[in-house]
Image: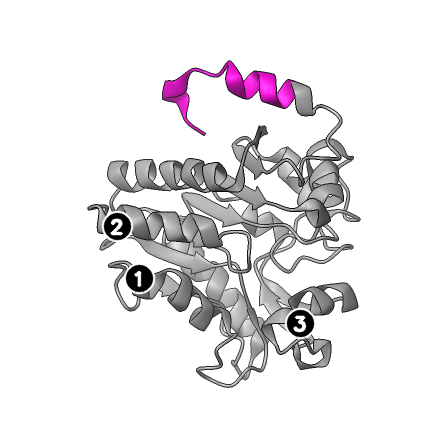
Amino acid sequence: MEVVIDAPGRLAVLAADAVASLVRRRPDAVLGLATGSSPLALYDELVARHRAGLSFAQVRGFLLDEYVGLPPGHPESYRAVIDRQLTSRVDLAPDAVQGPDGGAADLPAACAAYEAALRAAGGVDLQVLGVGTDGHLAFNEPGSSLASRTRVKTLTAQTRRDNARFFGDDPEAVPRHVLTQGLGTILEARHLVLVATGRAKAEAVHQLVEGPVSALWPASVLQLHPHVSVLVDEAAASRLQLAGYYREAWAGKPGWQGL
């Protein structure tokens, strides 16, 4: 696991460098796309790269999760959100991004179909991630199996409060159930890039990087992956006990290696 501590704008540039390098090497790369606040600056940077000539025309994308029960076209469905944040702003094909079907009549079947689609695509080359204040990864809440696959999950009250800002600041308007990639599914991506900013994420970042691997902090499962980049600002890094080492290691890294 590599930890980079820098200003938020610089973190977005580093993450975009990783995505751009991948897409140039493999124009048909598979990207895992997260929603929420954490990746916004990254997506803005990718849009700027696209306007400067980077093409996503052959890229495919998979969403981490989706709310259950939102009506088609709801502005806070993650299909709509990723369209606003990225898809409609670059040259991704209209059907290039898939998400789990939160409106399916048979939700377990929809989860199985999504796992099959990920396998058929050859897996995710680079997965963008954020982390919740309680350490949830995608919508794998505390207590989730570290080997879990795409499935239905019930959101905690904390997560619904955190997401209420997208639903008129009303936690009761946030759906109680979601479909989410499992922790085991996420670990199959070849490169994981997690972005976290702000003091509210500091304890979660400390636990995922330096705590024990535990279902109590689901994001700690990332310690088991061979290629994880954790990009955090000073506030999110404020609980890290080895922050000095992470800064030294990053400063001394050969520039050609990238993330």
Give the mark nearest the N terminus, 1 or 3.
1
Q: State if disc 2 and disc 1 touch (CB < 8 Å).
A: yes
Q: Residue at x 76, y 64 (%)?
A: 158
Q: Which residue is mark 1?
A: 89
Q: Quadrant of the C terminus?
A: top left
Q: How far apart in space, not on screen, are marks 1 and 3 (Cα)? A: 26 Å
Task: Identify whether 133 is placed above or below 7.
Answer: below
Q: Residue at x 39, y 36 (%)?
A: 18
Q: Crowdedness of circle 1 by 10 Å Cα count: few (<14), some, many (20+)?
A: some
Q: Which residue is mark 2?
A: 50
Q: Which residues are magenta?
A: 245-259
Q: Could you tell me which secondary element the residue under label 1 belongs to?
A: helix
Q: State if disc 3 and disc 1 touch (CB < 8 Å).
A: no
Task: Identify whether 65 is placed above or below 69.
Answer: above
Q: Which residue is mark 3?
A: 164
Q: Residue at x 37, y 36 (%)?
A: 17
Q: State if disc 2 and disc 3 touch (CB < 8 Å).
A: no
Q: Amino acid at mark 2?
A: His
Q: Could you tell me which secondary element the residue under label 2 belongs to?
A: helix
Q: Is residue 256 magenta?
A: yes
Q: Could you tell me which secondary element the residue under label 3 belongs to?
A: helix
Give the mark nearest the N terminus, 3 or 2.
2
Give the quarter of the image for residue 256: top left
> What predominant SS class does the magenta segment belong to?
helix
Q: Is residue 55 visible?
A: no
